[in-house]
């Protein structure tokens, strides 16, 4: 039990961003209540699903490389402390069909952060991974510390640890309440009650633009994304995680995947941002076009899986900020209210470090970084360059 010695904070949203923020605030001594309408890691959330890639290559964005380096340490630390499998370091292989500047720009930052990345010749890939068709690929990079995270499981373990340490959890929806003198006085709960706190943190993922429509309706938007899981050939372990790493195929599109064996099959997804999507009412039945596209890609890149059975297909969403970068800032008109989101599909891996940073900002130990601030949307029309994995 952590002794409470500071103020009272309400965190709305128990996904990766909200859960880690609540956990770190609790460890600082705050009285924290975390709430979520559907539960941590639920299928409608940005943090739902079976797995997420964790990787260090981030183009020219040093801020993300440094954050993911810290997140690697935190994932390993809490995995050991909690005796739970949270992080599977099976490595990550990048294939480039086109210019590899995105990887090259990251190399100095990765080296400074102590993350090992190697450029491998095609001959090495052919020897190590003969199950992959390399015919149209040019350059290759291998990240030693990368791998994947079991997303829903991580969110549920985090909630358990939060509650065991004295945090409070309510499975309810919450909306902003009355605002007076630039302060939010309370939040309105779906059971008809209200709740009062010293500070409010809204980490509502794809629902942020509905909670604050005037502030975020043109800044945070959801897109429909399809994910597929294929069965590996009977008795063939070449497509298990024991035989190959996580992979990213960087070409006209960005395809990525996680090998099968441990969980629910060989994961495959197209990172291209899909059509606008409502996280509550949107149709979550995968399209025939999406399945056909996935099969076409699978047959090309992994020829021995061309007839693989489709085990499962899911529709999730990215909650995209307009420039692909996170939003971590105070509400410009409400001093005791924070907005945390814009994960844009690539936030889960960084969530332990991100939650720690948010907690430091809320407690006054750090300033909001302009890179994540809301003011950036006033000064320029942003065009996203991030890849959403």
Image (spheres, helix red, strand yellow):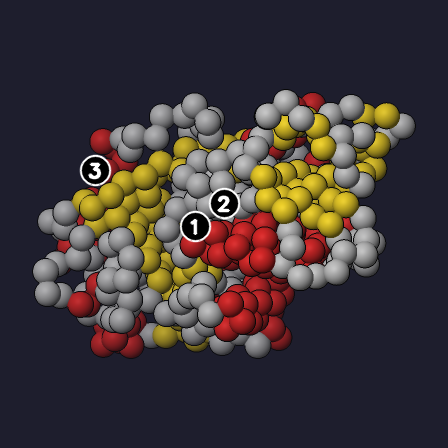
- Between the residue at mark 3 and the residue at mark 2, the CA separation in whole angstroms equals 32 Å
Nearer the viewer's eye, disc 3 or disc 1? 1
Q: Position of residue 30 (x, y in %)?
A: 75, 53
Nearer the viewer's eye, disc 3 or disc 2? 2
Mark 3 and 1 residues: CB-CB less than 8 Å, in contact? no
Mark 2 and 1 residues: CB-CB less than 8 Å, in contact? yes
- Between the residue at mark 3 and the residue at mark 1, the CA separation in whole angstroms equals 27 Å
The residue shown at (37%, 57%) is 248
- Residue on which the image places disc 2: 40
- Residue on which the image places disc 1: 152
Q: Assess disc 1: are there few (<14), some (14-19) or many (≥20) residues with their C-alpha within 10 Å of its C-alpha.
A: many
Q: Position of residue 220 (x, y in %)?
A: 59, 33
Left or right of residue 120, residue 215 in this image: right
Q: Mark 3 vs mark 2: which is more N-terminal?
A: 2
Q: Quadrant of residue 26?
A: bottom right
- Residue on which the image places disc 3: 292
């Amino acid at each position: 039990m952590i002794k409470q010695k500071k103020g009272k904070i309400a965190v709305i949203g128990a996904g990766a961003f909200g859960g880690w923020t609540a956990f770190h605030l609790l460890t600082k001594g705050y009285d924290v209540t975390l709430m979520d309408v559907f539960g941590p890691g639920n299928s409608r959330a940005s943090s739902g699903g079976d797995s997420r890639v964790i990787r260090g290559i981030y183009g020219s964005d040093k801020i993300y490389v440094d954050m993911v380096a810290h997140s690697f340490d935190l994932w390993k630390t809490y995995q050991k402390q909690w005796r739970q499998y949270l992080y599977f370091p099976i490595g990550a292989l990048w294939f480039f069909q086109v210019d590899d500047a995105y990887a090259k720009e990251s190399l100095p930052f990765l080296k400074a952060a102590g993350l090992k990345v190697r450029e491998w010749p095609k001959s090495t890939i052919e020897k190590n991974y003969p199950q992959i068709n390399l015919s149209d690929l040019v350059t290759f990079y291998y990240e030693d510390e990368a791998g994947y995270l079991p997303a829903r499981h991580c969110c549920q373990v985090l909630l358990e640890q939060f509650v065991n340490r004295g945090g409070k959890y309510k499975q309810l929806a919450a909306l902003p309440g009355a605002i007076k003198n630039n302060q939010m006085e309370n939040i309105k709960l779906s059971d008809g009650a209200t709740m009062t706190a010293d500070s409010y943190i809204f980490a509502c993922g794809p629902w942020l633009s509905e909670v604050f429509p005037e502030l975020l309706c043109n800044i945070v938007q959801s897109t429909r994304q399809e994910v597929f899981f294929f069965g590996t050939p009977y008795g063939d372990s070449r497509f298990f995680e024991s035989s190959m790493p996580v992979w990213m195929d960087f070409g006209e599109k960005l395809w990525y995947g996680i090998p099968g064996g441990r969980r629910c099959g060989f994961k495959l997804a197209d990172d291209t941002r899909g059509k606008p999507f409502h996280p509550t009412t949107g149709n979550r039945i995968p399209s025939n076009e999406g399945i056909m596209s996935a099969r076409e890609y699978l047959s090309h890149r992994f020829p021995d899986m061309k007839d693989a059975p489709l085990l499962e297909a899911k529709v999730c969403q990215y909650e995209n900020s307009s420039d692909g970068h996170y939003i971590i800032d105070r509400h410009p008109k409400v001093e005791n209210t924070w907005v945390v989101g814009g994960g844009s599909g690539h936030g889960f891996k960084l969530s332990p470090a991100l939650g720690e940073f948010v907690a430091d900002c809320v407690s006054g130990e750090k300033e909001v970084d302009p890179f994540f601030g809301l003011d950036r949307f006033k000064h320029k029309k942003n065009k996203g360059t991030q890849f959403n994995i």
